[in-house]
Image: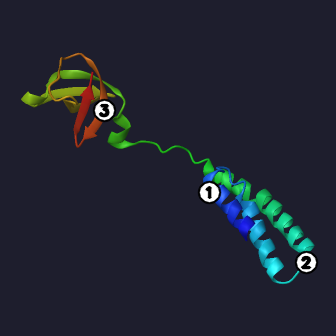
Amino acid sequence: MIAAAGFAVGEMHFSTGFYLAPFALGATVAAIVALAGTGTIIALICFLAVAFLSLAVLRPIAASHMKVPPRLRTGAAALIGKQAVVLERIANDEGMGTVRIDGEVWTARSYNDDAVIERGTRVDVVEIKGATALVTE
């Protein structure tokens, strides 16, 4: 059981590829078989059989689940990081400003409150708050 615990802790802290968990499972089965009163040789054979069988069967399954594609950003979140063109001068204190992002016109405010961004300037979208794009030069 100590070996099983050691392999399990090793899997959680040091391994990222599901390498040690099959050995933890094999050690657990070997400990149960040994507690049932069989000999050391039988327990060792059970350990090896379970460990290598689960490594051969379960690791490919675990590996396929680890290859999840990155989450796609959709909606307003997909606009963050894009470039935009200022259509109407952006001045936060005057409450004015619009930009064109991917062909769509958005109300815009400067991410820096006191910055004024003139018409025609290329800006980066930093954040979307409701229907307003926060941009920076």
Quick check: 110 left or right of 46? left
Q: Quadrant of residue 79?
A: top left
Crowd tier of the residue under label 3, counting other residues whose Cα lies within 10 Å: few below 14, some 14–19, many 20 or above: some
Q: Secondary structure at mark 2?
A: loop
Question: Which quadrant of the figure has residue 117?
Answer: top left
Residue 29: x, y in percent?
A: 78, 73
Query: Does residue 94 appear to the left or right of 111 in the view shown?
Result: left
Q: Earlier in the sequence, mark 2 or mark 3?
A: 2
The residue located at (64%, 60%) in the rendering is: 9
Residue 97, by quadrant, is top left
Mark 1 vs mark 2: in front: 2
Q: Which residue bears the numbered disc 2?
A: 39
Q: Residue 96, image x and y in percent?
A: 12, 28
Q: Are marks 1 and 3 in contact (CB under 8 Å)?
A: no
SS at mark 1 in the image: helix
Is 80 in front, or is 106? 80
The residue identified by callout 3 is 126
Q: Residue at x 23, y 32 (%)?
A: 106
Please identify the quadrant where the C terminus is shown. Answer: top left
Residue drawn at the location 81% of the way across and 72% of the way down? 30
Q: Is residue 7 above or below residue 116?
A: below
| Distance in Å between CA atoms under marks 2 and 3 | 66 Å
Dot 1 amino acid type: Met
- Is 120 on the left or on the right of 3, as rendered? left
Does label 1 or label 2 sit earlier along the sequence?
1
Q: Nearer the viewer, residue 59 or 40?
A: 40
Q: Amino acid at mark 2?
A: Gly
Which residue sits furthest bottom? 36
Element type at mark 3 = strand
- Which residue is under mark 1? 12
